[in-house]
Image (cartoon, rainbow, N blue to C red):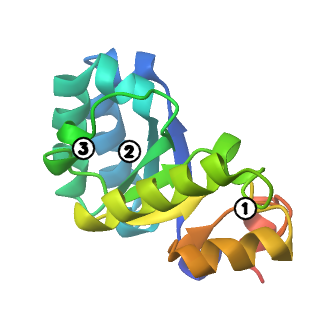
């Protein structure tokens, strides 16, 4: 089965989805009916959406983590909100926004932002993912800063799910 070969699939959630009271039961029902291994699903929630509907996002995350799903806080750093909520927000990953990553080789402020977000992520028990890892030099810089994962054309081009599953 193609689904068994896929290590993890990330799904972006909108703030509107988090605010819809019918969406959580819908997702849970689909997991039960489809037989999809929930541990292979990582839902991505933008920092802005998470802060705007913090209690709903928290409830959503807790309910789906019970099924085995994982969560990433996407576009982290762009909302410039307090880092304080991270201690209690049950996501597994922080996705460092690509706006900081793409100029990391030339802009010391962006490099420091990535380093700081990575360090705070690790201190709060979260793994980090850097967006916009477009070439080997950026990937090497991310490695040197201790970032856990990278996403971008320097890693691989976007592919259809079925093609990924059969690789």
Note whether residue 125 is visible: no
Residue at left offset 56%, top offset 71%: 149
Looking at the image, is 36 positioned above or below residue 27?
below
- Circle 3 residues within 10 Å: few <14, some 14–19, many ≥20: many
Q: Which residue is mark 2?
A: 30
Looking at the image, is 3 positioned above or below residue 56?
below
For marks 3 and 2, give the one nearer the viewer: 3
- Give how far across and how far down residue 87 sits, in percent: 16, 49
- Whole-angstrom CA distance, mark 2 to mark 1, is 19 Å
For label 1, the SS is helix
Q: Which residue is mark 3?
A: 61
Say which quarter of the image contains residue 158. Answer: bottom right
Q: Which residue is mark 1?
A: 161
- Give how far across and how far down residue 153 sits, in percent: 84, 62
Contact (CB < 8 A) between labels 2 and 1? no
Observer-nearest residue: 69 or 87? 87
Whichever of labels 2 and 1 marks the residue nearer the N terminus, that label is 2
For label 3, the SS is helix
- Whole-angstrom CA distance, mark 3 to mark 1, is 24 Å
């Amino acid at each position: 089965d193609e689904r068994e070969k896929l290590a993890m699939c990330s799904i972006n959630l909108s703030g509107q989805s988090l605010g819809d009271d019918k969406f959580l039961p819908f997702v849970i029902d689909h997991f039960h009916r489809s037989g999809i291994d929930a541990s292979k699903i990582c839902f991505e929630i933008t920092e802005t959406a998470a802060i705007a509907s913090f209690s709903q996002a928290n409830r959503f995350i807790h309910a789906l983590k019970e099924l085995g799903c994982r969560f990433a806080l996407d576009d982290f750093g762009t909302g410039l909100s307090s880092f304080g909520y991270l201690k209690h927000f049950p996501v597994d990953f922080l996705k460092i926004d690509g706006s900081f990553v793409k100029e990391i080789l030339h802009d010391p402020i962006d490099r420091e932002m990535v380093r700081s977000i990575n360090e705070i992520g690790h201190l709060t028990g979260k793994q980090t993912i850097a967006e916009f890892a477009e070439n080997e030099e950026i990937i090497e810089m991310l490695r040197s800063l201790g970032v856990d994962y990278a996403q971008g054309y320097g890693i691989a081009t976007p592919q259809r799910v079925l093609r990924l599953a059969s690789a």
